[in-house]
Image (tube, helix red, strand yellow):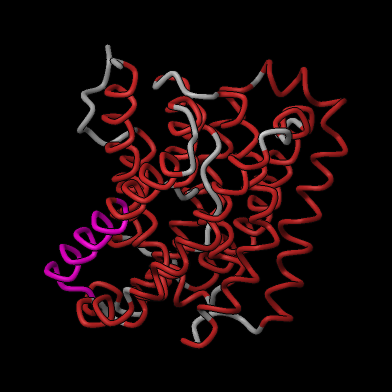
Amino acid sequence: MKRPRFLPDNMTLLLLGVVTLASLFPARGAVASGFDHLSIAMIALLFFMHGARLSRQAVVAGLTHWRLHLLVMAFTFAIFPLMGVALKPLLLYMLTPELYVGILFLCVLPSTVQSSIAFTSVARGNVPAAVCSASASNMLGIFLTPLLVSLVVVAHGESHSSIDAMLKIVYQLLLPFVAGQIARPWLQAWLEKYEAVLRMVDQSSILLVVYVAFSEAVVQGLWQQLPPVMLASLLGISALMLAIIMVLTTVISRRLGFNKEDEITIVFCGSKKSLASGVPMAKVLFASHAVGMVLLPLMLFHQLQLMVCAIMAQRYAKR
């Protein structure tokens, strides 16, 4: 049975459940320390699987459409961060500085892979180009996201030092990713056979990191610092940012003369931010007490982008 388009997806429901669990029963002491070490190992496994799944052939094959890919990367790693900086007066008026850091972190993340490709396919867009752009975005994000965090977020004092963050990126994210790419020829058949099981491992990794992050935040007094009216403001700001980027991707792709199939790819790949990459990166890049607050904007934006893109994909498909 098809899920109504306005209902949250299963991953969002699981995230809400984990946040509720962390709010009622936060991990403390030795338990928290054990979960923290386990989450580091799970993050390494997650990026190893990312590396093993990404097809280098698809990326190389799509590179001929360089104008489209450059525009998608410009939206993902330039226009999005500039929007976050430009909206600073409004955001700091409505949100706490910690939540604004979360907004900035959201703005520097790479695009999603699975949902960008899926929505492009439903909308009858350029699927090979979507595969290339989404894959390249995630590979570049391993390097560009930490760099952009050091440029636009470190001034707020919530991230680790740049050297510490880069070392963690190398041994927790980059090395497992490269190892996965190297191992891909031997693992490809196995990955395809057990895709459903591996997706559960991916989701479990993200849920564990979220539980650890929100446990720490709850112990530090997260919900005392975040009244319901601020949550509502955060939701409204997320909707505003998504609306701005969707309009920009649509208008600019048309002004530059892209056909409808390429426009669809640009809209869906250039407007999304990856929860799967964002959660482990936040764990690596930010102090443990700040991770829960930093992830809140990403979690809200994640659900909004899925609902809005589902509606747009159906409308594109009817053209």
Residue 169 on image: x %, y %: 71, 65
Residue 270 on image: x %, y %: 48, 46
Residue 115 on image: x %, y %: 46, 33
Q: Residue at x 55, y 60 (%)?
A: 77
Q: Is residue 160 magenta?
A: no
Q: Specify whether 246 is left or right of 165.
A: left
Q: Quadrant of the C terminus?
A: top left
Q: Nearer the viewer, residue 25 or 190?
A: 190
Q: Residue at x 43, y 31 (%)?
A: 264
Q: Residue at x 62, y 22 (%)?
A: 195
Q: Residue furthest left?
A: 229
For the stretch drawn in magenta, the main secondary structure is helix
Residue 13 on image: x %, y %: 31, 40
Q: Quadrant of the N terminus?
A: top left
Q: Nearer the viewer, residue 35 or 40?
A: 40
Instruction: Give above or below for 174 relative to 219.
Output: above
Q: Nearer the viewer, residue 312 or 118?
A: 312
Q: Residue at x 70, y 61 (%)?
A: 143
Q: Residue furthest top?
A: 1
Q: Nearer the viewer, residue 297 or 315?
A: 315
Question: Magenta segment, which residues?
Answer: 226-242
Instruction: Give above or below for 138 relative to 229.
Output: above
